[in-house]
Image (cartoon, rainbow, N blue to C red):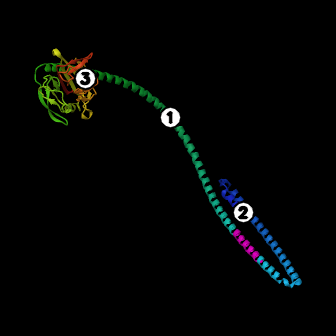
């Protein structure tokens, strides 16, 4: 193995080796310096060996030249005719000599290359020494910083210990305060419960008073309405203004207790055909002095923003008079097919016939098919319990009736539906 391979192997080992830890820089530096000196000694020994080899080769060549000269002299002495052979040998010797010169030049160039590589490696070693010095300075700075941080950590530990002591004291104080707060909260809770019970009792008493007053008012107005509607007095025609619709004429019944009642449906004269289409029931039809339907759109405008009461006056056969009262009547608008949105509480002696139809839409379409499927002009339900917009001549589901018992319909001779704004 020549010196070039040794040096390259040594450099590869130096490059591929991992960086030592910071406390081993001095050892690495000493090792690198010793390895460099050893490499230089090895190179010198190699060069000496090569020079010895070259000198031996030159001696051998000189011996060969002497032998050849002796041979030439012998050939000259023996045979002068061998001049051609001698010239041939001389040319061979000249070629050999030129080859030796070329070999010498090649070896000299190799030696120059070795020397240049050695110079480059020395420069690299010098740069590594500079890097090592920089790293040593950085290590010193880091050690100083670590010392400072260690001192800060000691100070912070002292602060933390003092803070822990203060926190423990504050926690003890907080616990005492929490105990006091819990005691106060329990006392407040008991007082709040007492206050709530008293408030509930007061509210209950007020509600009872209001219910009694409302019951008196409702019973008074119902009695007054029954007397008015059972008589033969004509209703009064008034003009009222509705939101989005404007002024309209309505038939009203004036009572002494509260505002007047507006008639939204009246049937009994049997002069108006209620077998009408959808638009007629939306807009309204009939005569205000006789039978008429005020219109779904107007009923929605009345009951949209305020609570309304509904009173239904029913007259059955043999002039039997009954009524049904609901305290929160309201219907939806066109987009919801004028659904019966609310009825409220029921009072009366006719039966809660309209309750089944609550939350159902208004339908007017009739289908005359083989199965005779029909829809009443009413709030539709699969199993209806009343129909006040039917036909008087029909004695079936499509007649005018209110409530049924054991599958039999109780047909109505005349009916009036009245609403008014509820007094709150």
Residue denoted by label 1: 171
Quadrant location of the C terminus in the rendered image: top left
Q: Which numbered mark, 2 or 3, is in the foreground of this view? A: 3
Q: Which numbered mark, 1 or 2, is in the foreground of this view? A: 2
Which sits earlier in the primary sequence, circle 1 or circle 2?
2
Secondary structure under the numbered disc 2 in the rendered image: helix
Q: Residue at x 44, y 28 (%)?
A: 182
Is residue 406 rendered magenta in the image? Answer: no
Foreground pick, 84 / 243: 84
Count residues near mark 3 (Cα–Cα under 10 Å), then give few for <14, some for 14-19, many for 20+: some
Pointers 1 and 2 in contact (CB under 8 A)?
Answer: no
Q: Quadrant of residue 28?
A: bottom right
Secondary structure under the numbered disc 3 in the rendered image: loop
Range of the magenta residues? 97-115
Which sits earlier in the primary sequence, circle 3 or circle 1?
1
Is residue 291 left or right of 46 when viewed as pictured? Answer: left
Outermost residue toward the right in this view: 78
Outermost residue toward the front in this view: 370
Distance between mark 3 and mark 1 Cα atoms: 68 Å
Distance between mark 1 and mark 2 Cα atoms: 76 Å
Q: Quadrant of residue 361?
A: top left
Outermost residue toward the left in this view: 233
Residue denoted by label 2: 5
Residue denoted by label 3: 354
Residue 303 appears in the picture as rendered: yes
Q: Residue at x 37, y 26 (%)?
A: 192
Pointers 2 and 3 in contact (CB under 8 A)?
Answer: no
Foreground pick, 255 / 407: 407
Distance between mark 2 and mark 3 Cα atoms: 113 Å
Q: Residue at x 34, y 24 (%)?
A: 196
Give above or below for 111 relative to 209: below
* Residue 210 in the image, given as x and y percentages of width and height: 25, 22
């Amino acid at each position: 193995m020549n010196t070039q391979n040794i040096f390259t192997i040594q450099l590869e080992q130096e490059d591929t080796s991992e960086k030592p830890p910071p406390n081993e820089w001095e050892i690495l530096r000493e090792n690198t310096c010793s390895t460099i000196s050893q490499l230089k000694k090895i190179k010198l020994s190699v060069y000496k060996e090569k020079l010895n080899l070259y000198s031996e080769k030159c001696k051998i060549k000189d011996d060969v030249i002497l032998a050849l000269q002796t041979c030439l002299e012998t050939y000259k002495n023996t045979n002068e005719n061998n001049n051609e052979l001698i010239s041939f040998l001389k040319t061979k010797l000249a070629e050999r000599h030129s080859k030796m010169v070329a070999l010498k030049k090649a070896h000299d160039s190799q030696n120059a290359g070795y020397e240049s590589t050695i110079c480059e490696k020395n420069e690299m070693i010098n740069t590594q020494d500079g890097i090592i010095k920089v790293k040593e300075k950085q290590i010193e700075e880091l050690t100083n910083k670590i010392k400072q941080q260690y001192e800060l950590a000691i100070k912070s530990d002292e602060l933390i210990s003092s803070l822990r002591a203060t926190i423990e004291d504050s926690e003890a104080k907080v616990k005492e305060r929490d105990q006091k707060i819990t005691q106060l909260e329990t006392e407040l809770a008991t007082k709040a419960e007492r206050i709530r019970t008293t408030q509930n009792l007061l509210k209950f008493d007020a509600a009872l008073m209001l219910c009694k007053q409302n019951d008196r008012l409702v019973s008074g107005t119902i009695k007054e309405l029954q007397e008015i509607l059972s008589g033969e007095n004509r209703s009064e025609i008034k003009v009222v203004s509705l939101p989005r619709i404007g002024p309209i004429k309505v038939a009203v019944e004036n009572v002494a207790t509260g505002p007047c009642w507006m008639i939204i449906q009246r049937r009994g004269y049997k002069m108006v055909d209620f077998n009408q289409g959808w638009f007629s029931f939306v807009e309204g039809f009939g005569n205000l002095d006789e039978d008429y339907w005020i219109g779904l759109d107007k009923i929605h405008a009345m009951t949209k923003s305020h609570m309304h009461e509904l009173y239904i006056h029913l007259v059955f056969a043999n002039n039997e008079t009954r009524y049904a009262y609901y305290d929160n009547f309201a219907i939806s608008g066109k987009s919801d097919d004028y659904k019966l949105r609310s009825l409220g509480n029921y009072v009366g002696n006719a039966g809660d016939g309209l309750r089944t139809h609550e939350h159902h839409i208004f339908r007017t379409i009739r289908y005359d098919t083989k199965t005779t499927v029909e829809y009443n002009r009413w709030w539709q339900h699969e199993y209806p319990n009343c129909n006040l917009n039917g036909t008087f001549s029909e004695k079936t589901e499509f007649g005018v009736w209110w409530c049924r018992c054991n599958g039999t319909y109780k047909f109505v001779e005349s009916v009036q539906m009245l609403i008014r704004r509820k007094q709150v």
